[in-house]
Amino acid sequence: MENFKQRYKASSGSFFNMLMANNSSVPVVGEGATILSYTDRHAYTVREFNPKTKKVIIQRCESTRVDNLGMSDSQTYDYTKHEDYFIVLKYRYNNWYEECYNKHSDENDYSKKRIIFGVRDEYYDFSF
């Protein structure tokens, strides 16, 4: 299996997300995936993975908060439902990139995504 080491350099944002972004996790169909934003995290499920083309399709989880802790750092979510939202990611240049179609140039564009596979985690930072 190929090494999918991600390299991330940042000067600010969530320290926890920065630590999670430097990983070598490999996508496994049916397991979780977490996209790491500046301070937030968003839960997904891996639907398809092709190691030859280095492409993965992930589906957004409909995260429902199940705790009663209000605006706190301790948050618990239920991930049983999924939205009809899919993202195609391609591994290139030591990072995962979202593959998007640009209708103006009639070509694919790529947007870098920080992601960790094997973990399904939702987090909303109320301080931003």
Image (cartoon, rainbow, N blue to C red):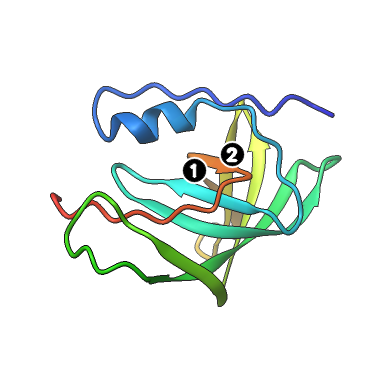
Q: Residue at x 55, y 40 (%)?
A: 116
Disc 2 residue crowd, few under 14, some 14–19, many 20+, Cα 10 Å: many
Residue drawn at x 22%, y 63% is 69
Counting residues from the start of the chain, the first of labels 2 and 1 encountered is 2
Residue type at numbered disc 1? Lys
Tell me the quarter of the picture where residue 2 sits. top right
Name of the residue lying farthest toward the left = 127
Give x and y (percent) for residue 18: 38, 29
Q: Which residue is mark 2?
A: 96
Q: Is residue 77 left or right of residue 125?
A: right
How far from the left and from the top, in percent, is residue 121?
A: 47, 52
**Is residue 104 positioned above or below 24 on the image?**
below
**124, above or below 15, in the image:** below
Q: Quadrant of residue 54?
A: top right
Depth check: give the residue in front, 44 or 64: 64
* Residue on which disc 1 sits: 113
Alpha carbons under labels 2 and 1: distance apart: 6 Å
Residue 119 x/y as whole percent: 57, 47
Q: Residues within 10 Å of mark 1 (few under 14, many from 20)?
A: some
User: In the structure shown, which secondary structural element does the residue marked by tag 1 occupy?
Assistant: strand
* CB contact under 8 Å: marks 2 and 1: yes
Quadrant showing the N terminus: top right
Mark 2: amino acid:
Trp
- Relative side of 85 to 88, left or right: left
Q: Residue at x 78, y 51 (%)?
A: 49
User: For numbered disc 2, what is the local secondary structure?
Assistant: strand
Residue 126 vs residue 85, the one in the foreground: 126
Residue 107 position within the rendered picture, expressed as x and y whole percent measured from the top left = 61, 55
In the displayed structure, would residue 71 be above or below residue 55? below
Q: Label for residue 41?
A: none
The residue at the far front in this view is 68
Q: Tag count in the figure?
A: 2
